[in-house]
Image (cartoon, rainbow, N blue to C red):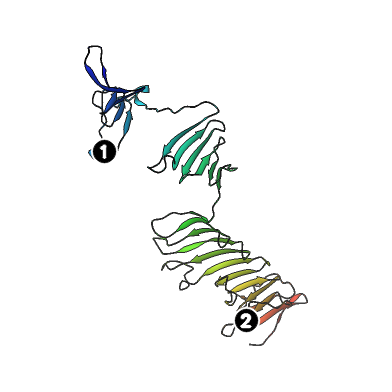
Amino acid sequence: MPIIDAFGTPDLWSESGSNIYRESLVGIGTTSPLPPLHVQRGSTAPTISAGSLEQTSAVFNSDLSATSGNAQYNRVMFLSSSTGNVHLNFGDESSAEIGALGYDNTTDAMTFRVNSAEAMRINSSGYLGINRSNPSYTLHVEADNGIVFSYGVSGRGGLEYDLANSSLSIIRSTDKDNGQSCGLNVLCSSKRILLTTNNTGANEVLNRSQTDNSICLLSAGDIRLGNTTALNASTLPAMIIKDNAVGIGTESPNAGAILELTTTSKALILPRLTAAQRPTGVNGMLVYNTDDHKLNIFANGSWEEVTSS
């Protein structure tokens, strides 16, 4: 039934039991409310487009003409007891709380609810937990399918954890300037640490026709260097350090040698020095003397010729 004002005139408000309602717009602080509920401070009304206004149920605006003092600020408070919670729910016709922003006064934690489940929480220490209700670190993430921090318009770069391959990668991929990808990869499943670069830019020093140039640290203590797909055991590295021996052109340097060179098309070039340039000798030193064009070896305390010209 309509409510009668003090002058006996029917008001725009109606009463139904203990409920009082109005079928048109409600304005508090304004005689020209824009959405169904409009709470305004000051005399300046906001400008809202027709399309946005059709989608807006309520507006709370401060004094829009204020440029200093408290009048320029706007607060909407949602309060509960120290043992209660406050929630701002988001939903649809089938669920009024499928999403929510909440604050737990008992633990002083802010929660974010997505698809009817908590997805993120900031606890009283300021720690952020993603899929973690009790974060123990500044950023604490639990993920079933990996984590990627990416940058760039195209491609992928940043920090990535691949759960399927148990690998942690610091990567830079599809660089827009010179098409390079590089990174540090920690492969837990195969117990490897890889430093890799794959460069296609014309000005890149490590360009090897887009082959992988890598440093591979293996769990056995071996180190592979050079043009090799480090996970492919059938591909020989340019150099390997294995069991305190260096192998160049061989996957398995002889255990009795400190250096093994294997090649079918190249030679070993020794240091080429004049007699005056030869260093203070140590027995076993070997150089090529450019004065007399002979090999010199330091043996028994002096430099000696090894071959004739």
Where residue 6 appears, as percent x and y from the top left, is 25, 12
Can the viewer see residue 3 in this picture?
Answer: yes
Mark 1 or mark 2: which is in front?
1
Where residue 244 appears, as percent x and y from the top left, is 71, 70
Residue drawn 72% across and 77% down? Answer: 257
Q: Which residue is mark 1?
A: 54
**Tag 1: residue type?**
Glu
**47 left or right of 301 in image:** left
Where residue 24 appears, as percent x and y from the top left, is 25, 28
Nearer-the-camera pick, 305 or 42: 42
For residue 174, which quarter of the picture? bottom left
Crowd tier of the residue under label 2, counting other residues whose Cα lies within 10 Å: few below 14, some 14–19, many 20 or above:
few
Residue 262: mark: 2
Q: Up-down: is 105 above or below 268?
A: above
Crowd tier of the residue under label 1, counting other residues whose Cα lies within 10 Å: few below 14, some 14–19, many 20 or above:
few
Between the residue at mark 1 and the residue at mark 2, the CA separation in whole angstroms equals 79 Å
SS at mark 1? helix
For residue 98, which quarter of the picture? top left
Can the viewer see residue 273 in this picture?
Answer: no
**Tag 2: residue type?**
Thr
**13 left or right of 133 in image:** left
